[in-house]
Amino acid sequence: MGSFKWINLFIIIFKYFLTITPIFSYSNEVPNFLDLAKEPQVFDWMVDIRRKIHENPELGYEEFETSKLIREKLDELGIPYKHPVAVTGVVGYIGTGLPPFVALRADMDALLMQELVEWEHKSKVPGKMHACGHDAHVSMLLGAAKILKDHEKYFNGTVVLVFQPAEEGGAGAKKIVDAGVLENVSAIFGLHILPGIPLGEVASKSGPMSAGCGLFEAIISGRGGHAALPQHSIDPILAASNVIVSLQHIVSREVDPLDSQVVTVGMFQGGGAFNVIPDSVTIGGTFRAFLRESFTQLKHRIEQVISGQAAVQRCNATVSFLEEKKPLIPPTVNNGDLHDYFKSVAGSLLGTDKVKGMEQMTGSEDFAFYQEALPGYLFLLGMEDISAERLPGPHSPYYKVNEDALPYGAALHASLAAGYLAKLHHEVLVVEGKYHDEL
Ligand SMILES: [Zn+2]
Ligand SMILES: [Zn+2]
């Protein structure tokens, strides 16, 4: 009886502390960061950063000026950071510096292509362009940093800002993970701005979202000779042709039709004369799958089919997946619990009708490397002004960013991070409370 009273007293004190602790609660006490992000001191600041980066696009692992600009802005905000991480990467910290940790990611790299949009802030570097919106990603994460820094005193934990290099095929995310800066991080969130989705809306899904992506190249060697005397040669052109046909049988005959996969041969190089059988042929292509096991199995079968089918035609084949130059990108698979959390946060910020589902995409995203290391969630941020002309798609030389989307990205980043720290803190308190209840 005596101990029962002590427990009751503890519960009363515990509940009192829960009510007065000045920490954002999971969904209803996080400030409206969208209103803040639309204020000129945040919005104009983000636009200015985005345009500066757009004018000076840098390719993967060469984002030296972009990285410098990010560090200058973090210095301006009084946010400590680590640099260099993964060559040009910057990792900033807002909050107590102690666990729990939640991470937000922006990619920094541009593409090897000429901008064809004529505007005041057009790329000043011939042949290089921000045509995937990574300039906007950096400015939105800095916008979130600016907002979060102003609310830092309410945090019970730390927001980790990840500015990563080389998303476009360079696997910068993998280098960030390998650098160890995300150890002890509970979750990571990322976004990709996209035309085709209206401004103010977001889209995402639980589970596989974008495909794993790999490249392959095979040299099929026979024995060259006169085209009129095929009996004295071993024809690699015929062998390569059979290889290509057999590769198409993997998806059509071996794979569950509901488990979408792609094998495309996009390159065939061999022969240079009408009447000569060449010594060798080189073919190359790409493969995609949404499930990690399917991706691994597909890679394995591509190698087997090329070697086996070349051997049927008496040729030798050497197969390479070019992982040194272009690392395999695993499928992007969104964590189910984080999906529920995202819908709740984005729904209260934008309205539940603005949070859409989506079909999985056969494109790839190196955010997948984070998701292999820790729970991660990637979503698409709309920027299409439905009353204006349709925006060209990513990687188009006419690509444009609707800068009105910047506050939405910044506010979502900030809300997801602040809310997640509050959620983790609340869960710890509940667990502790239960523990004492059971005494
Ligand atoms: Zn891209
Ligand atoms: Zn991109």
Image: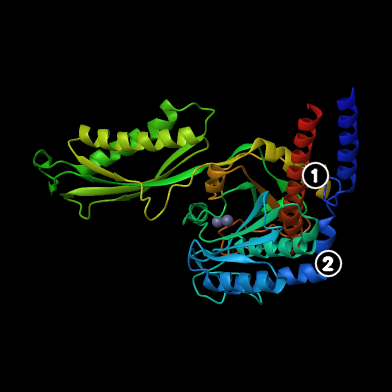
Residue at image position (35%, 48%) is 284
Q: Residue under circle 2?
A: 39
Of the residues shown, which amino acid type is indicated by label 2? Glu
The part of the image, by quadrant, that contains residue 122 is bottom right
Residue 7, x across and y down, in percent = 86, 30
- Determine if residue 364 is in view: no
Residues packed near mark 1 inside 10 Å, few (<14), some (14 to 19) or many (20 plus): many
Q: Secondary structure at mark 2?
A: loop
Nearer-N-terminus badge (1/2): 1
Q: Secondary structure at mark 1?
A: loop
Q: CA distance from mark 1 to mark 2?
A: 24 Å
Q: How many marks?
A: 2
Question: Of the numbered discs in the image, which one, if any, rests on residue 55?
Answer: none
Residue nearest the viewer, comparing 255 with 293: 293
Residue nearest the viewer, comparing 384 with 74: 74
Residue nearest the viewer, comparing 415 with 169: 415
Q: Residue under circle 1?
A: 26
Residue 407, x across and y down, in percent = 76, 61
Residue at image position (46%, 33%) is 294
- Determine if residue 138 is in view: yes
